[in-house]
Image (spheres, grey):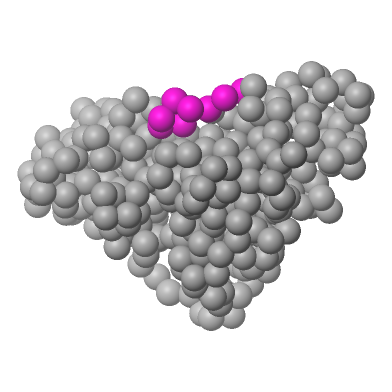
Amino acid sequence: MSDELEDLPGVGPATTAKLNQVGFDSYQGIAVASPNELSKAADIDTALASDIIKEARQAAEIGGFDSGASILDKRDPVSKLKTGHEGFDELIGGGIETQSITEFYGNEGAGRTAIAHLLAVRAQLPSEHGGLDGQAVYIDSRGLFDPERIQEITSNLTESEKDALASKYDVEVDDVEGLSTRVLDNIHISSPSDSTKQILNAEQAYEKAESLANTDNPLRIILVDSLTFHFRAEYQGRGELAERQQKLNKHLHDLRRIGDLHDAIIVLTNAKTNGSKPYGGNLLGHHSTVRINLKQTSGEVRRAELEAAPNLTAGDEVDFYIDNAQVVANRPS
């Protein structure tokens, strides 16, 4: 549910409507905005925008400190999502951690979208099968979400994994179509047409996580494929770089908040620049807990290189293949 923005000094119904229209409907969102960004969005002067941001930070309780012990307590429920490829999981420390942002970047054909689809399914598996026992949000900025690929992934799970999902969703294990339908029912897809709508989708994902928080099937993974697609198209000149990074920073803060508050995984896919670096610059590099460079080396062979991760060896690599929409270790026969 949105915060009552009109409780902030200097924010009336008209200003609230303008802010909501461009995705500012919470204290948290306003708190991480810049005065210039808020001024343009609400058509107010920058001094008033600064005052509103200051009040929003106080209302959202942003800027305080936690003890090291309290941070450790918050990490107690951290879980790991398995990819189904033992070597891939070892590369990233046993699986993709909740309360973290994991970025997969690479060129077309490297496997970014295939991995995103796979994780949307595997997150629904019970924890004893390497899953997170929860639902997924898929923010599909490139229009590449494919329900038939989800059906293929589901039908090619191991027998024990299918048994577990069938039991969870109360369908017959041999009812592949019924099982795939239930899996698709628990992936919530949005297809934003621009960066503003994409940012709004993250706010809506937070609301979805809140509504599912006390159920037996909570929201456990947010997938954004691709994070930077709209930002690259809309902010192309050097003069627009600062504004782009400000909006991207807000978006990443919103996504991280979901991960932290709901013990969820945030998975981002991203493209490479002409210089083979990931888009987003140092800003995205600082936000990404784990960063993985995906490469298509030759033919069907793909390679994952761990570029950055806490307590793991950067530069380690593992080869993988995409077979029946699964990430596998051996060349398909």
Identify whether 177 is placed above or below 211.
above
Q: Is residue 112 left or right of residue 151?
A: left
Residues 192 and 89: in front is 89
Secondary structure character of the magenta stretch overall: loop
Q: Is residue 135 something that shows in the picture? A: no
Identify whether 148 is placed above or below 159.
above
Residues 225 and 11: in front is 225
Picture coordinates of residue 286, whole percent (x, y):
37, 64
Residues 331 and 287: in front is 331
Q: Is residue 32 left or right of residue 244?
A: right
Magenta span of residues? 140-147
Residues 188 and 154: in front is 154
Is residue 117 covered in magenta? no
Q: Is residue 87 left or right of residue 21?
A: right
Picture coordinates of residue 213, whole percent (x, y):
65, 44
Picture coordinates of residue 143, whole percent (x, y):
44, 25
User: At 54% from the left edge and 55% from the top edge, which residue is drawn?
Assistant: 303
- Quadrant in the picture for residue 80: bottom right
